[in-house]
Each structure stands twice: as C-alpha cells, then as structure tokens.
Amino acid sequence: MSPGQFLLARVDDVVRWAQSSSVWPLTMGLACCAIEMMTATSAEYDIARLGSEVFRPSPRQADLMIVSGRVSQKMAPVVKRLYDQMADPKWVISMGACASSGGVFDNYAIVQGVDTVVPVDVYVPGCPPTPDGLLYAVNLIQQQIREGGRGGLLTRA
Amino acid sequence: MAPSRKRLFNVIALAKGLAVTFSFMFRKKPTIQYPSVKKQHAPRFHGLHELRRYGDGKERCIGCELCSSACPANAITVVGAENAPADRRSPGERYAARYEIDELRCIFCGMCEEACPTDAIVLTPRFEMADYRRGAFIYAKDRLLVPPEAGLGRPPDERPGGIPEDLGRVADIKSTMDIATGYSATKRGEILKTQRKGLAG
C-alpha cells in the first residue's frame, strides 16, 4: 500500500464518520407517523444524540428523507420531486406500514409502498412505529453509512 | 400608569419565566439513552408477534385461520394441515403448516390476539423491527414460533375438558423469552448495542 492510498483510506473513514453523525432529515410529515417523528426530537427520545435533530425544510440541505405516513397517488410525484432535489448522498427511511407497503389502505388512492417511487434504505414497520423504533432505523442508516453504503440507488448497484 | 413602571413589570415577568427554565436544570433528565437503555413500554404495548407453544413443546396454533380473517390489513397467511398421529405438532386435529405475517403490512392492532381461540398468537413488547429489505419482513414460523423450551401451560389433550387451562391469560404474559438474548428479530439491535459497548470499553 502506497502512502497516498493510506491517506485516502483514512479520509474515507473520517468522511463516513462525519456523514453518519449528522444525518439531517427533511421535514416531511405526510400523516400520523409524523407525530411520532416529531416525538423523536423530544427530550425523552432526543434524536439529537444521533446528530439528526436538524430537520431541514429545504430538500437541498437534507440528507435523509423520512417518508412518515401514507403516500397518496397525488402526493407521489411530490415525494419523487423532493427526493430528486435532495443532494447526494441521500438516504430514505420508509416509516410505518402505510409508507412501506400501503398498510390497511389497499385501495386506489394510496401508493402500495413508497419504494415504487423512491429507493428506500430502511423500512420501519408499525402503525405508527414508536419513536425509539425510528431511532433504531436511524441507527441502521448510520451503520450503513459507516460500512460504506452510499444510500439510495447506489446501495443496490 | 407611567411607561417606565410598565417596563419594570415586564422585567419581573421575564425573570419569573427564566426562573422556571432555570429550575429545569436541576431536575432529573428525561432522556432515555436509547440503544444502551431501552424504554419499558406500557404493559399492553403492541409490538412484534410471537407464536406460542404449550409447556410440552406442542404448538398452540391449530390452523383455524381466525386470525387471518380478523386481520384488517390482510397481513396474515395461515395454511392448515392435518396432524399426523405419529408426529403431532399441536393438540388439535390440525396445525399451521404455514404461518406467515407480513410485518410491514401489519398495523399491530391486536385483533389476531383477540381472535385466537388458543392464545397462540400474541403481540410482544419488541419494537425494533426495522430492516434494509422489504422481503425481510415476511415473518414465517421460523422467526415467529418460540423455541420448544419457551412453552407455556398444560396442553388440552392432557385435560378432561379439552380446554387449555390458561385460556385468556397467556396474552397477559407479554414475552416468554428474554428480550435481550436469542431472538432473531431483535438480534440486530443487540449487535448494535454490543458494538457500542465495544467502542466504549
């Protein structure tokens, strides 16, 4: 191994550490799961310990999209557009039964899983999931970043 | 009233407000240090399912499919089969040859738990269910069924009435297994936890 390779490998580790310690979510509450998502920022659960307390209202400044709630057919193009506007690297958590698979709403109005619209990294079951269930999902995202996973489409590449 | 005096009152109000804020600095911190410390949820919390056994290791499920018809999300698939006399899986005539729950479709309402005539399917307090792949959420019997040593109660075929003696009470026992160890569904959470411990110590 040459000195240059050694340096780049260390830089990669530092970048991963930095990325995984500041996964900023996008403020995108779609339904009741958003209430639990907000509770995750409360003092009791305190998502700030994971470095994810800064909910960005603009997609350009966000790293993580938490699809919290059912995605209607009308909302699907908006979700897609917001995802496209986020800067790489970006990650997606599909929170709750409705976002992940449609849940009880197996009907014409609801998209049966948001992974048909955007690539999802971590699925969280529950209706809604508890805030600590969401923290666990953020933990999984962090673990993925630390192991060198890129997120989004590149995960599957 | 003179304007200066009015301003003075505002300062007092400000000090009162800040005193409340300041007093919180000396109270107990409400934060749960999540991956290392897990919250004790409410006693009737609805989490991941568990398929129970009797004390002798026989499955409680008799493959009646009542849970799957009660399920509002159509998340449960049960395929029953006749018990072979030589190898009885459950005390009844039938047992569940296939028992699958789509945990991603499930809304954790507990209707299956209510519908079950033998207290076979129970919702446990496990909440760490997130995973990377959608296919990983089809929980079959290999992950739902508790190990034979974690069975509960006397099976009905040893009893004259043919009714499980603990009927209606098994669901109150929220977990027959130690949550911290040996359950594949929460295994990843345990890995995360031990890694953190390794980093700390």
Image (spheres, coloured by chain):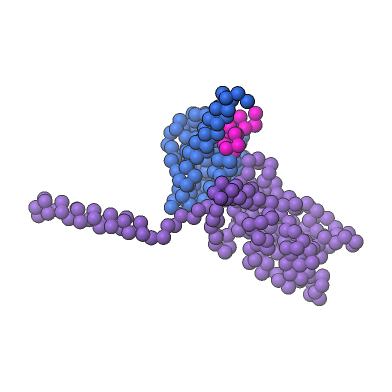
Chain colours: A blue, B purple
Residue at the right extreme, as displayed = B86
Residue pictured at 68% horizontal, 61% vertical: B177
Q: How many marks?
A: 0
Q: Which residues are magenta?
A: A144-157
- Furthest-bottom residue in view? B160
The image position of residue A104, as x and y in percent, is 61, 48
Q: Is residue B98 left or right of residue B115?
A: right
Q: Residue at x 28, y 54 (%)?
A: B18
Across and down, in percent, residue A7 comes to 55, 27
**Residue A66 rendering spot, x and y as whole percentages:** 52, 40
Q: Quadrant of the N terminus of chain B?
A: bottom left
A151 inside magenta stretch: yes
**Does A45 sit above or below residue B167?**
above
Q: Please name the residue shown 47% across and 34% down the image.
A: A62
Say which of A114 and A22 sits in front. A22
| Image point (74%, 64%), residue name | B151
Q: Position of residue B22 (x, y in %)?
A: 31, 56
Pick whichever, B34 or A13, lies toward us: A13
Residue B16 colored in magenta in the image: no
Residue A95 in sight = no
